[in-house]
Image: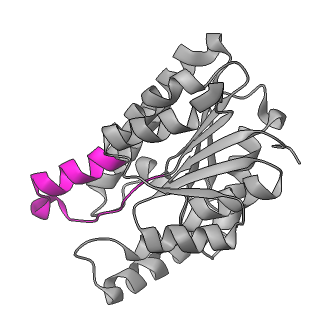
């Protein structure tokens, strides 16, 4: 019960790593709120995790984010843990990248994540923790991944700067970077066919020394560790959960 009576907000918690983390926080006693863009999956998540409160909010909508945080902060309530997990994928070779694709991916995966943290700061105080979902894709040269890699690499850099700025306030900021994880995000890349996803999945498995995809629960355990008091002397860290894919290639 590491999170008993603690208030947690998971941005992007209605599926995959986010939902596994919502479940983990709730099972360890937290009061959990989470966001998503799809009401159907939000409702399913709330049924899966009784007591967790889902909110239909797009992280790119600053006004909606402000309303959510205002409601969470009523009666002097604060946040103990903020998990930034919202993100989208997108693959395209260099010659086919469009400005619209680039802007869409960077808006969700980088810009809106930073502004969401900025907006949440009034609710965070000494002893609180921020965890951000990165990706080992930010540090590899996977063909067709320039847009996503650039956004996640920027988020990694921003994480370190934010950790340095907030350390004197007693707020820890860390990142968890998954490798190939079996989540719905893999199948939500605009313009990528099912056959292409299957081929990409096979290539990912081959690139992992453990020769398998990771599971959302395996990443969630790392998220919960970084958010807990067990990681009280850890900030600005990037914890890779990738089966050795980044360092053992």
Residue, far bottom = 195
Residue drawn at x 65%, y 73% is 47
Q: Is residue 145 magenta?
A: no
Residue, far front = 75
User: Is residue 159 positioned above or below 225 on the image?
Assistant: above
Residue drawn at x 46%, y 79% is 201
Q: Is residue 109 left or right of residue 15?
A: left
Measuring from the top left, give residue 124's x and y in whole percent. Answer: 61, 25
Residue drawn at x 70%, y 18% is 126
Q: Is residue 141 left or right of residue 241?
A: left
- Foreground residue among 92 and 124: 124
Answer with the quarter of the image where residue 98 lies.
Answer: bottom left
Measuring from the top left, give residue 231's x and y in whole percent. Answer: 78, 34
Q: Is residue 116 left or right of residue 123?
A: left
Q: Is residue 240 left or right of residue 24?
A: left
Q: Quadrant of the C terminus?
A: bottom right
- Say if residue 191 shows up in the picture: yes
Q: Is residue 101 magenta?
A: yes
- Say if residue 113 shows up in the picture: no
Measuring from the top left, give residue 145's x and y in whole percent. Answer: 31, 59
Q: Which residues are magenta?
A: 86-108
């Amino acid at each position: 019960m590491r999170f008993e009576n603690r208030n947690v907000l998971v941005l992007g918690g209605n599926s995959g790593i986010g939902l596994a983390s919502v479940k983990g926080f709730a099972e360890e006693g937290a009061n959990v709120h989470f966001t998503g863009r799809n009401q159907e999956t939000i409702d399913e998540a709330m049924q899966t995790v009784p007591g967790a409160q889902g909110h239909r909010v797009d992280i790119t909508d600053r006004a909606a984010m402000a309303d959510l945080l205002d409601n969470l902060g009523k009666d002097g309530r604060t946040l103990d843990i903020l998990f930034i997990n919202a993100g989208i994928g997108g693959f395209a070779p260099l010659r086919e990248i469009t400005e619209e694709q680039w802007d869409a991916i960077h808006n969700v995966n980088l810009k809106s994540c930073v502004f969401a943290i900025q907006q949440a700061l009034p609710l965070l105080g000494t002893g609180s923790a921020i965890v951000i979902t990165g990706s080992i894709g930010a540090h590899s040269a996977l063909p067709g991944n320039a847009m996503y890699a650039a956004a996640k690499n920027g988020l990694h850099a921003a994480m370190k700067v934010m950790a340095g700025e907030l350390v004197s306030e007693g707020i820890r900021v860390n990142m968890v970077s998954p490798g190939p994880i079996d989540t719905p995000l893999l199948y939500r890349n605009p313009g990528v066919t099912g056959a292409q996803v299957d081929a990409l999945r096979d290539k990912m498995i081959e690139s992992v020394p453990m020769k398998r995809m990771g599971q959302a629960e395996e990443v969630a355990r790392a998220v919960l560790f970084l958010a807990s008091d067990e990681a009280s002397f850890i900030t600005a860290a990037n914890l890779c959960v990738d089966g050795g894919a980044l360092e053992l290639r």
